Image: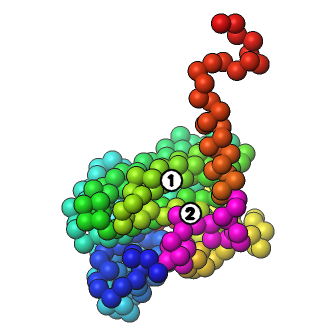
Amino acid sequence: MSEATSGNGPKGTAVVTGASAGIGKVYANRLAARGYDLILVARRGDRLADVAAPLREQFGVKVEPVVADLGNDVDLEKVATKIAGDASVTLLVNNAGTATFGPVAQTELGAIDAMNDVNLTALVRLSRAVLPGFKTRDHGTIINIGSVLGFAALQFSTVYSGTKAYVQFFTRGLQTEVAGSNVRVQLVCPAATATDLWEISGVPVTRLDPATVMTSENMVDAALAGLDLGEAVTLPSVENPAPLLAAYEAAAGAVLASSQNGKPASRYKIAG
Ligand code: NAP
């Protein structure tokens, strides 16, 4: 079991963004059950209050709802400053996210901005907010929620996949930055999970093959089990991810290595 999820002492405070619904709401429940106090962030204060009350009662933990629009600079800065200055924070789950599926030219600019702002900018800003404290205390865990769509840009998911590819690279990069310390960074890449995100995206979950859809409870329980197992990248529905990820990273490394020669490739027939 990892330091973040085991031990007898107080666990500290877990910050869960997007805790008013779906996957984040389940993280809030499971982390409260593990003994974390909680800071729960989302725009819908009424939903956060509904999530918080039973957790306080059932698990006896402190739960602080923070109503914030993570797509808004002022709100984002407010949350970042709050969690940067709180030494009790030992875990950050960057879960808040949004999706609007469809061709780029037919997608509202506001929806594109929201995906970039929430899925990507807020995740980077909040990671950066907690990292100095985690490094100084040599303790702390960041869980970034990516997606299997971060491995593939499908016709309907150009922007969303782009944001999740960013999450993947950013999180893998952070892992190299904290290597050798007790700070942990986990990338979680769910496949289709039964949440409101699908309705919001314009593709109701009922249009998916039910056999491909996981419950949010199973997704979070698998992701936390992956954290306990020490996984850097957790693909909750993938039976044997290690060889796939090794091949993927080897191919990416080979592309990078083969580019390091300072010359146009011979197929372009550029003299000199
Ligand atoms: P969801 O049920 O729609 O929940 C999204 C959460 O994010 C809500 O709590 C929402 O709260 C919050 N959020 C959205 N925009 C926000 C904003 N501007 N400011 C603050 N909070 C905001 O979706 P979900 O499926 O649980 O999504 C959670 C994460 O999993 C996302 O990062 C998503 O990309 C990822 N994911 C989901 C699936 C899937 O199939 N569902 C698959 C792969 C990855 P408010 O509306 O109250 O603000």
- Which labelled disc corresponds to residue 121? none
Q: Nearer the viewer, residue 98 or 11?
A: 11
Q: Nearer the viewer, residue 49 or 260?
A: 260
The span picked out in magenta is: 223-244
**Residue 82 in view here:** no
**CB at disc 1 and ligand 1 closer than 8 Å:** no
Element marked by disc 1: helix
- Which labelled disc corresponds to residue 172? 1
Residue lying at the far bottom in this picture: please name it: 58
Q: Quadrant of residue 43?
A: bottom left
Q: Of the residues shown, which amino acid type is indicated by label 1?
A: Arg
Element marked by disc 2: strand
**Residue 182, horizontal then vertical, whole percent:** 36, 67
Q: Identify the residue position indicated by label 2 in the image.
A: 233
Q: Residue at x 66, y 48 (%)?
A: 250
Numbered label tally:
2
Q: Earlier in the sequence, mark 2 or mark 1?
A: 1
In the rendered structure, the answer to whether residue 78 lies left or right of residue 94 reads left
Q: Residue at x 57, y 42 (%)?
A: 108
Q: Mark 2 touching mark 1, by CB under 8 A?
A: yes
In the rendered structure, the answer to whether residue 256 lies left or right of residue 84 reads right
Check disc 2: other Cα within 10 Å, few if <14, some if 14-19, many if 20+: many
**Residue 195, horizontal then vertical, whole percent:** 59, 70
Q: Residue at x 55, y 58 (%)?
A: 146
In the rendered structure, the answer to whether residue 171 lies left or right of residue 182 reads right
Q: Nearer the viewer, residue 64 or 139?
A: 139
Q: Nearer the viewer, residue 81 or 67?
A: 81
Query: Which corner quadrant holds the C terminus?
Result: top right
Check disc 1: other Cα within 10 Å, few if <14, some if 14-19, many if 20+: some
**Residue 99, horizontal then vertical, whole percent:** 58, 55
